[in-house]
Image (tube, grey):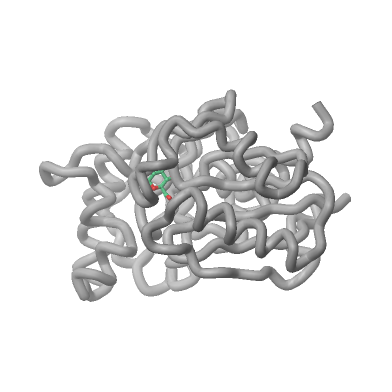
Amino acid sequence: MLTFGVDIGGSGIKGAPVDLEKGTLSQQRFKVRTPHPATVAGVTDGVKQIVDHFDWSGPVGLTFPGVVTVGSTIRSASNVDQDWIDMDARALFSERLGGHPVTVVNDADAAGLAELRFGAAMGRRGTVILLTFGTGIGSALFNDGVLVPNVELGHLELWGQDAERRASSKAKEEGGLAWKEWAGRVKEYLAHVERLFSPELIVIGGGISRESEKFLPLLDGVRTEIVPAQLHNDAGIVGAAMCAARQAAA
Ligand code: BGC
């Protein structure tokens, strides 16, 4: 079965049809740059370009880099324009896409669902946390495979500010930090998450998970099992498509 997933990120908006049996993209993904500022008009245009590129006409699952309530209202917009707040995301995208059935979920929640079903956390029970390091830090919390949506662990206060301001991969890039220096911050952050949640497993996702061999060995001292994501940057697209399929079947 094929469904379509689109992942709206801080630097790019990317999408592709997804094979939901295998959890893989069935065609090479298509990407456009996220406009800056990432306004409602600019981002919805980008999403439309992607869906049109594949001439897709079925249900579309979308991720959003902020809190999206079960009723589909956007409640936070840390790394995109503030004009998103209080928008009905499902109605907005569905209208822009000419009436496609649309499902919208938090980006990290989508990535977590994909990693739990097809990737690094496949079949894992207990408390599992996926953390995505990108423009911000996204988080998905599971207990025995069940997602607690919209857990915003990137905004835990550490060093007197939101942890993501110093430990995201954007903070690494902007600060010109070496792996060791950045990993030191990530280690403190993970130790904090560990103290609060005592997870069985932490999955490290986001684009930076492709380079996990450069920083995972530096995260000594964190007792929780830490593994890199397996779907890397495709996790959001796959998770979004999974949510769209669930919604279509409901
Ligand atoms: C947002 C989260 C999002 C994360 C990654 C954070 O700033 O508050 O909702 O999952 O960035 O995009």
Q: Nearer the viewer, residue 219 or 67?
A: 67
Residue 113 x/y as whole percent: 62, 42
The residue under the point 75% across, 32% down is 247
Q: Nearer the viewer, residue 236 or 22?
A: 236
The residue under the point 60% across, 39% down is 92
- On-image quarter of the C terminus: top right
Left-right relation of 20 to 73 = right
Left-right relation of 84 to 174 = right
Residue 80 x/y as whole percent: 39, 50
Q: Quadrant of residue 217?
A: bottom left
Vertical arrangement, residue 117 with respect to residue 37, above or below: above
Vertical arrangement, residue 78 with respect to residue 52, above or below: above
Can you see residue 21?
A: no
Farthest right residue? Answer: 1
The residue under the point 51% across, 52% down is 41
The residue under the point 38% across, 64% down is 216
Can you see residue 80?
A: yes
Q: Quadrant of residue 86?
A: top left
Q: How many marks?
A: 0
Residue 150 x/y as whole percent: 46, 32
Residue 154 x/y as whole percent: 33, 44
Farthest left residue? Answer: 160
Q: Quadrant of residue 156?
A: top left
Left-right relation of 136 to 22 = left
